[in-house]
Image (cartoon, helix red, strand yellow):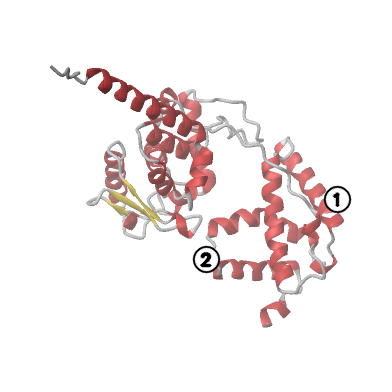
Amino acid sequence: MDEVRVCTTPTEALNAFHRYQRRRGHQASTQRAYDQFLEPFAVWLGNSGFDRVDARDIEFGWLAHWSEAFQARWSREPSTRHVRNHLTALKVFFNFLDRFGYLRSNPMRRIDRPAIVKRTPDWLSVDEDAAMLGAVSTPLERILVPLLRWTGMRSSEAEALRWQNVRFADQEIWITTSKTPGGRRVIPIFDPLMPVLEEWHRRRDSRAVTGEQCFVLATSSGKPLSHTQVWVSVKRVAHRAGVRRQVAPDRGGMNVSAVSPHTLRRTFASDLFNRGARLEVISRLLGHSETRTTEASYAQLLDARISWEARSAYARQTQTQYQTPVTVSP
């Protein structure tokens, strides 16, 4: 009750929302994803109370202001997906305010989120995959790209990975910090990754940054890599490999390839599909809470696999049928 009373400004309400999210077990990565939209929104509101904000203020005031600022910074309009993520953050925040009595009415109930047209799955082809793995140059690139490629980890999971969760003896990586509680899982260290991990461990050990609590992907000072550093590194390697190069649309000129860390995650899964791994196994390795998520992402490969297995079964049955000796009664 006291917490509700002190939330008189947007900043105080945002702090209360953060505490609420942490108590519900939401990961820091989720909070950061929301805050990229909510913090500027709170600044824009100033000392205005949330109970005075209506749908027109959000649609024609804040969203118009945010879109103009985005276009000025990036020289393009925000994508439909980015707008949808923005509105999702506002919706979750205002639902919190509404639930605990901050609002007379929830303005987000009047605002629709744009529909998303699903993008074509962006896993790498065999040639692209080999080109990227062969284009790593710096010590950091030599661990970062194979780690994402051969584990299927989300970028945020790789950034949070500590040496205590790399079990060399058992050839396993334990994911203990994930997007959702269901994302906590064990990933085998596949043969192509093991020597890379061991070499990186030796290199970090020589600099005394391989203690159990040390981050695997860390700077020379031991600080974990930021999401931007991971993203830029993958883009740089892909561009050097000649994989899906593009004219950088961002002002900083960093987005030089259409490949992203998530592309490597999808490549990990598509490779396992093509090797015959079951959907349930791949879903668990990816940290999906249910197989429907995996199936939706890899429907094309799944359909092809089903067709191949059906044809193989038919061919085996046909071969057996015609090879079976025919017994003729005397």
Residue 297 in percent (x, y) is at 52, 39
**Image quarter in which the N terminus is found:** bottom right
Residue at 40%, 31% in the rendered image: 136
Q: Which residue is mark 2?
A: 25
Q: Is residue 165 above or below residue 126?
A: below
Can you name the residue that lies furthest to the front here? Answer: 330
Residue 64 appearing in the image: yes
Q: Is residue 70 above or below residue 52?
A: above
Mark closest to the chain's N terminus, 1 or 2: 2
Q: Residues within 10 Å of mark 1 (few under 14, many from 20)?
A: few
Tell me the amino acid under the disc marked 1.
Answer: Phe
Residue 5 in percent (x, y) is at 73, 80
Residue 60 numbered tag: 1
Q: Do the residues under discs 1 and 2 have CB atoms within 8 angstroms?
A: no
Q: Is residue 150 left or right of residue 330?
A: right
Tell me the amino acid under the disc marked 2.
Answer: Gly
Q: Is residue 126 left or right of residue 50?
A: left
Residue 246 numbered tag: none
Q: Of circles 1 and 2, which is in front?
A: 2
Secondary structure under the numbered disc 1 in the rendered image: helix
Q: Quadrant of residue 315?
A: top left
Residue at 61%, 66% in the rendered image: 18
Residue 138 appearing in the image: no
Q: Quadrant of residue 35?
A: bottom right
- Compute the Cα span from label 1 to label 2: 34 Å
Residue toward you, 145 or 310: 310
Residue 239 in percent (x, y) is at 51, 27
Q: Quadrant of residue 272?
A: top left
Residue toward you, 205 or 32: 32
Residue 241 in percent (x, y) is at 46, 25
